Image (cartoon, rainbow, N blue to C red):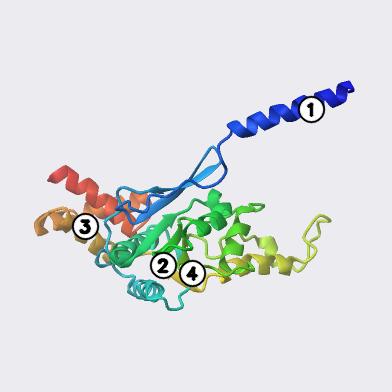
């Protein structure tokens, strides 16, 4: 046996031993008896697992104001899904802090006793969507795969896994799975001024720029239902602030006295949103109660 053959044989032996020491790349078992209705997909040492979320945000549908149309449409879509009727994957887009994520959480709290479950998937783990689907496709519950604050950069290939899962695979999406995603970008991928050019003067530019634009738009088109959210007016912001102060136990006099501080808080944050109102209410109530 030559020296090279001996070396290759020893190398193969070492690799075999290492493979036996490495953890399995398949997903771990799931504790379906857990009392929670929400899970996170987590990867550790190459192994994926559905980890129960012990405490879920208590936000409810009545806590969300000035998004009645969005609330009605998402609630109806989710109800159809739970009843085994046709329903759409949903993209919630718009201004930050206006209730996109809260609306998804509120729907979970509203329908969890009817078998609705939520799995939070990080953008970097979208490549595991097939693996997650295999884990839950035969379960009796109805699952929402939830991607929060979703957006992709140029050259980011992780969006392809989501694009295929939405409407690009030969395999049909299981009947007990929907995808709900929130984003500040309507088309999820960055758009450039150069996308409007009919051609590029750069010799390395895109030969067919119109097709690049179509690629970006077609991604968000694969969500059957789009829900758009908009910034709040000053009166709407103050109304939401008062709602949360009441929930913390403040009196009407205390709420009236908080108005100027609430407006200054929003000015410093550069945003009149439901999130800003809730954050101010926590700060204010914590100081005066």
Identify which residue is drawn at 72% across, 28% down: 13
* Residue assigned mark 3: 244
Q: What is the secondary structure assignment of the residue under circle 1?
A: helix
Circles 4 and 3 in contact, beta carbons < 8 Å: no
Mark 4: give few (<14), some (14-19) or many (20+) Cα within 10 Å.
many
User: Closer to the camera, 73 or 269?
Assistant: 73
Give the Cα distance between marks 1 and 4: 52 Å
Q: Is residue 233 visible in the rendered structure shown here?
A: no
Residue carrying label 1: 9
**Disc 1 to disc 2: CB gap under 8 Å:** no
Q: Secondary structure at mark 3?
A: helix
Q: Is residue 3 above or below residue 248?
A: above
Residue under numbered circle 4: 89
In percent of width and height, residue 236 lies at 28, 66
189 horizontally vs 257: left or right? right
Residue occupied by mark 2: 229
Q: Quadrant of the N terminus?
A: top right
Please provide percent x and percent y for residue 228: 44, 69
């Amino acid at each position: 046996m030559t020296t090279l053959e001996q070396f290759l044989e020893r190398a193969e032996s070492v690799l075999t031993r290492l493979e036996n020491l490495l953890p399995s790349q398949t997903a771990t078992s799931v504790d379906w008896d857990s009392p929670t209705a929400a899970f996170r997909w987590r990867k550790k040492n190459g192994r994926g697992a559905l980890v129960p979320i012990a405490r879920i945000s208590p936000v409810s549908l009545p806590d969300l104001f000035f998004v009645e149309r969005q609330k009605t449409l998402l609630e109806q879509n989710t109800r159809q899904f739970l009843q085994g009727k046709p329903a759409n994957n949903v993209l919630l887009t718009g201004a930050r802090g206006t209730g996109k994520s809260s609306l998804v959480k509120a729907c979970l709290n509203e329908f969890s006793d009817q078998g609705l479950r939520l799995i939070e998937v990080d953008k970097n783990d979208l490549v595991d969507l097939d693996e997650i689907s295999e884990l839950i496709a035969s379960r009796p519950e109805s699952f929402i795969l939830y991607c929060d604050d979703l957006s992709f950069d140029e050259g980011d290939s992780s969006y392809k896994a989501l694009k295929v899962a939405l409407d690009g695979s030969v395999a049909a999406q299981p009947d007990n799975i929907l995808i709900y995603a929130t984003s500040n970008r309507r088309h999820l991928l960055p758009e450039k001024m150069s996308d409007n050019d009919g051609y590029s003067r750069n010799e390395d530019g895109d030969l067919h720029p119109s097709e690049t634009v179509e690629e970006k738009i077609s991604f968000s088109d694969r969500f059957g239902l789009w829900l758009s959210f908009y910034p709040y007016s000053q009166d709407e912001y103050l109304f939401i602030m008062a709602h949360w102060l009441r929930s913390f136990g403040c009196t009407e006099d205390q709420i009236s006295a908080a108005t100027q501080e609430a407006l200054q808080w929003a000015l410093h944050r550069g945003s009149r949103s439901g999130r800003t109102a809730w954050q101010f209410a926590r700060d204010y109530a914590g100081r005066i109660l």
